[in-house]
């Protein structure tokens, strides 16, 4: 029986095969050696063979993305996980080719724009979000763009709970502590004085929360909801790649490493 090192070196030799299918099968097998493969890839990442070098870089990219997904899944169990950081991570689970710096610039631009309004009260926050033209997407629309923070910041339209998350984090920058709540089917923001801000209908303010009518959502709950909506978006469009990536995030939250509990063909 071959030792792991021998298996890895044999599979690496197949990456130079002219047949893409052979190379792809070799890459799939190499990914099974996730925990010990880095030194082998490091030896070849600057290879003079352009085809081999390209496939080595592809493998390293896949491994990096997979590890990032695993780390994010673990972090989702942490109630103190930073909400914006978590939403960025979910954005990159879907738009994995986006540059993190570019998405960060959109967030920094929003915070910088808020300086003119100093939204340190819920009334000022409502005015700022209204002036910035943030709009709630149509209810039950599963367009993944409505749950990816980078696209929401760029297009200014998104799911109501994503808009609430964005507004809450803007407010936190100005030392205004708000809570995301759900009233019947609508998400809203609650301030310390009991005032409620609904992103729908032009960021409408309600003078007082009706006790017992709302459910409070913490950061972990909001990130799990975002993950679930992206997974539903993937299933509704039969996007197997995203079913796999987002599905693994959700599975690991529940203590599972594989998707074998899903029906065929999603469990492969």
Image (tube, rainbow, N blue to C red):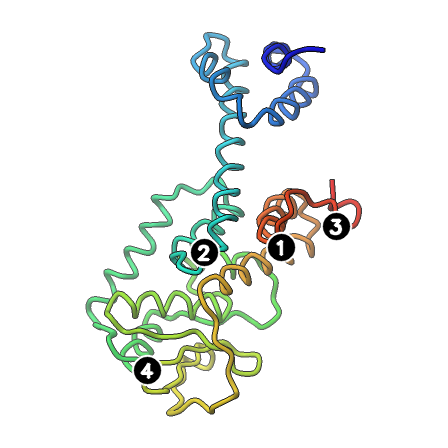
Q: Which type of secondary structure does the marked residue at label 4 adopt? A: loop
For the residues labelled 2 and 3, say whether their Cβ atoms are less than 8 Å apart. no
Q: Residue furthest right?
A: 264
Query: In whole angstroms, how far apart are the C-alphas of marks 1 and 3?
Result: 12 Å
Quadrant in which residue 79 is drawn: bottom left
For the residues labelled 3 and 4, say whether their Cβ atoms are less than 8 Å apart. no
Image quadrant containing the N terminus: top right
Q: Residue at x 64, y 43 (%)?
A: 257
For the residues labelled 4 and 1, say whether their Cβ atoms are less than 8 Å apart. no
Which of the two discs, 1 and 3, sits closer to the camera?
3
Query: In whole angstroms, how far apart are the C-alphas of marks 3 and 4?
Result: 43 Å
Query: In whole angstroms, how far apart are the C-alphas of marks 2 and 3?
Result: 26 Å
| Residue 262 badge | 3
Q: Residue at x 28, y 55 (%)?
A: 108
Which of the two discs, 4 and 1, sits closer to the camera?
4
Query: What residue is shown with label 1?
Result: 231
Q: Position of residue 227 (x, y in %)?
A: 56, 56
Q: Residue furthest top?
A: 48
Q: Residues within 10 Å of mark 3 (few under 14, many from 20)?
A: few
Label whose residue precedes the other's in the sequence (3 or 4): 4
Label whose residue precedes the other's in the sequence (1 or 3): 1
Query: What residue is shown with label 4?
Result: 192
- How many numbered discs? 4
Q: Residues within 10 Å of mark 1 (few under 14, many from 20)?
A: many
Q: Position of residue 52 (x, y in %)?
A: 54, 13
Query: In whole angstroms, how far apart are the C-alphas of marks 2 and 4?
Result: 24 Å
Query: What residue is shown with label 2?
Result: 78
Label whose residue precedes the other's in the sequence (4 or 1): 4
């Amino acid at each position: 029986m071959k030792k792991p090192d021998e298996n890895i070196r044999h599979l690496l030799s197949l990456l130079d095969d002219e047949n893409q299918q052979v190379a792809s099968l070799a890459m799939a097998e190499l990914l099974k050696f996730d925990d010990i493969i880095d030194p082998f890839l490091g030896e070849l990442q600057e290879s003079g063979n352009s085809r081999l070098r390209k496939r080595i870089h592809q493998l390293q990219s896949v491994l990096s993305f997979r590890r990032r997904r695993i780390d994010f899944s673990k972090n989702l169990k942490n109630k103190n996980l930073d909400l914006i950081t978590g939403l960025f991570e979910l954005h990159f689970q879907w738009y994995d080719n986006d540059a993190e710096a570019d998405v960060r610039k959109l967030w920094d631009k929003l915070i910088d724009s808020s300086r003119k309004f100093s939204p340190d009260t819920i009334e000022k926050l409502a005015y700022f979000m209204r002036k910035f033209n943030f709009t709630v997407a149509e209810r039950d629309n599963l367009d993944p763009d409505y749950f990816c923070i980078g696209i929401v910041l760029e297009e200014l339209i998104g799911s109501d709970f994503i808009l609430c998350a964005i507004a809450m984090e803007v407010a936190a920058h100005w030392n205004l502590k708000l809570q995301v709540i759900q009233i019947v089917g609508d998400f809203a923001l609650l301030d310390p004085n009991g005032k409620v801000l609904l992103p729908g209908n032009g960021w409408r303010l309600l003078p007082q929360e009706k006790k017992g009518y709302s459910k409070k959502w913490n950061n972990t709950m909001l990130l799990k909801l975002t993950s679930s909506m992206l997974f539903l978006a993937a299933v509704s469009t039969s996007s197997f790649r995203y079913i796999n990536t987002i599905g693994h995030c959700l599975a690991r939250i529940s203590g599972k490493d594989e998707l074998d509990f899903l029906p065929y063909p999603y469990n492969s």
